[in-house]
Image: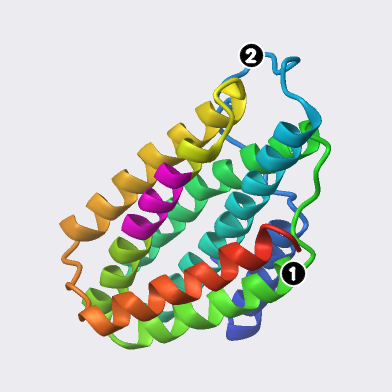
Amino acid sequence: MDRVFTGIDRWLSVASRAMTAVSSGVAAQRATPGDGTHDDTLDTRQRQLSAALMRVNHVGEVCAQALYEGQALSTPDPALRECFRQAAIEEGDHLAWTRERIDELGGRVSLLNPLWYAGALTFGMIAGRLGDRTSLGFMAETERQVEQHLDGHLQRLPDTDARSRAIVAAMKDDEVAHANTAIRHGAAELPTPVRLVMRAAARVMTSTAHYI
């Protein structure tokens, strides 16, 4: 007999996935981009810069896990729920890649990861409650802004840090695909004030994560 999952079961599953994301326990399903490249030419300043930028990207992936979790919880549409879950799985690769690279560079992840996760989960649940088209609109806009953010990192990363650059480039390709998926599923265009608020919130997060 198939088991019927209760609300408690679902929330226990959410808590388990949250712990996995925050503790960087997510395992990548794809090989890390740039495997086999070396960065022996990076000096101390360059390593510190790359580690800080990858920490910011890691925070972004923690938030992505939480955002999609919240949206999946809120939608009544099973197909859309699976869409959000699949996006989270692909973003899980990014989480593992960035954590691996941070370790290689001798850096650390953000001390505020539990806070980032809780905030993004709440945001995702609110977005989901606004309706599926609006929720997909938040997904599309988030991914567009992340794409721009990653473009900026590709400009700032040292030219000789081929491994970090390969990771960021692969992440960017996935973000573009996720935005396109949201649009195909009927994403609504968000009002300009909402997009500006999202951009401002992201700026606060990235600025803080660069150091903490």
**Prevailing SS of the magenta stretch:** helix
Residue at (69%, 72%) from the top-left corner?
15
Residue 145 point in image, percent of width and height: 36, 59
**The magenta segment:** 143-152
Q: Would residue 149 be counted in the magenta stretch?
A: yes
**Above/below status of 74 relative to 43:** below
Residue 144 in view? yes
Q: Is residue 98 left or right of residue 103?
A: left
Figure quadrant of the N terminus: bottom right
Colour option used = rainbow
Residue at (56%, 35%) from the top-left corner?
157
**Above/below status of 136 relative to 40:** below
The residue under label 1 is: 112
* Kind of residue indicated by mark 1: Leu
Q: Nearer the viewer, residue 59 or 121?
A: 59
Residue at (79%, 37%) from the top-left corner?
103
* Kind of residue indicated by mark 2: Thr
The residue under label 2 is: 37
CA gap between label 2 and label 1 equals: 31 Å
